[in-house]
Amino acid sequence: MLEDRLTEPREHQIEGIKFVTGKLHGRNVVVVWTGVGKVNAAMTTTLLIEHFKPERIIFTGIAGAVNPQLRPGDIVIAEKTAHHDMGTVWPEGLFVKGVKNRLDGMENPVFFQANEQLVTFAQKAAERFDMQRVETVAGRRIPKIITGVIVTGDSFIASTEKCAELRKKLNADAVEMEGAAVAQICYQRQIDHLVIRSISDSADEGAVLDKQMFYILAAKNSSDLVAEMIGLLGSELSTEKGSGSKKSGS
């Protein structure tokens, strides 16, 4: 959806993956789809960094709700992300912990903090754009946007019990399969990042059907917010720094 908004689009094939460069609200951007899962996300992010040298990376898409107050179409701006399936398994269960950073030998944190400036821009953008309404039995509902915690694992979650565990252990608001991998690469490469997800399902036993029903709406709301954010980011940075432009990846 973001790709369709670009002006002066140009396609690049790198290791069989399509990257599209262009302009969005006058800013130079690169758009790429990572594919499903943490390995695909990490690989694509690394290729993006190596070939296009972005100064900021914004990752967006859909997620399952862990926070019981969230519904399909709602958006979570991640102030931090974590791998929910990385750590040590004891008889009592999984103890989540970070792994050693191969670049500096230090242990990564459990939570990867998003860039505060990008979070602020996303929050400002959320106040400006018109979200697509959700049709419900009670009528059309206006989705809400929160700032919270997104957790990542290599399994699609469709379990009320697992949701309760993620909420209790990590205070998660949403769960998906790529965000923390992107955040980890950015953390290790010292690149500002932000993960934004729109809710497509409740990550419970009805998740598969909900995702099929709300996927398009959730993806549109998420991409619309990112587009609004880039426009706002571009205008404010231009005011601060003149007419210089920087590349962003998403």
Image (cartoon, grey):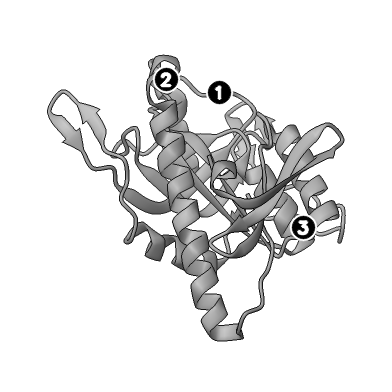
Toward which corner of the image does residue 97 lie, by quadrant?
A: top right
Q: Which mark is residue 102?
A: none
The kind of residue on which mark 3 rests is Gln
Q: Alpha carbon of mark 1 to alpha carbon of mark 2: how far? A: 9 Å
Q: Amino acid at mark 2?
A: Ala
Location of residue 190 in the rendering, given as x and y in whole percent from the top left corner: 74, 64
Q: Secondary structure at mark 3?
A: helix
Label ID, residue 207: 2
Q: Residue at x 86, y 58 (%)?
A: 105
Is the Cβ of the residue at disc 3 closer than 8 Å to that at disc 2? no
Between 112 and 183, the one lying in front of the other is: 183
| Residue that protrudes farthest toward the left in the picture | 138
Tell me if label 1 and label 2 are in contact, CB under 8 Å.
Answer: yes
Label 3 and label 2: CA atoms lie apart by 33 Å
Compared across the picture, whether 82 is left or right of 55 comes to left
x, y (%) of residue 15?
87, 35
Taking the image as shown, residue 72 lies to the left or right of residue 175, namely: left
Which type of secondary structure does the marked residue at label 1 adopt? loop
| Residue marked by disc 3 | 188
User: Is residue 136 shown above or below 84?
Assistant: above
Q: How many neighbours does mark 2 have within 10 angstroms: few (below 14), some (14-19), or many (20 or more)?
A: many
- Residue found at x 63% / y 49%: 250
Distance Cα–Cα, label 1 vs label 3 = 26 Å
| Amino acid type at image mark 1 | Phe
The x, y position of residue 130, in whole percent, is 30, 51
Residue at which label 1 appears: 156
Query: Relative to the observer, which residue lies in front, 39 or 214?
Result: 214
- Secondary structure type for disc 2: helix
N-terminal of the pair, mark 3 or mark 2, is 3
Answer yes or no: is residue 119 visible: no
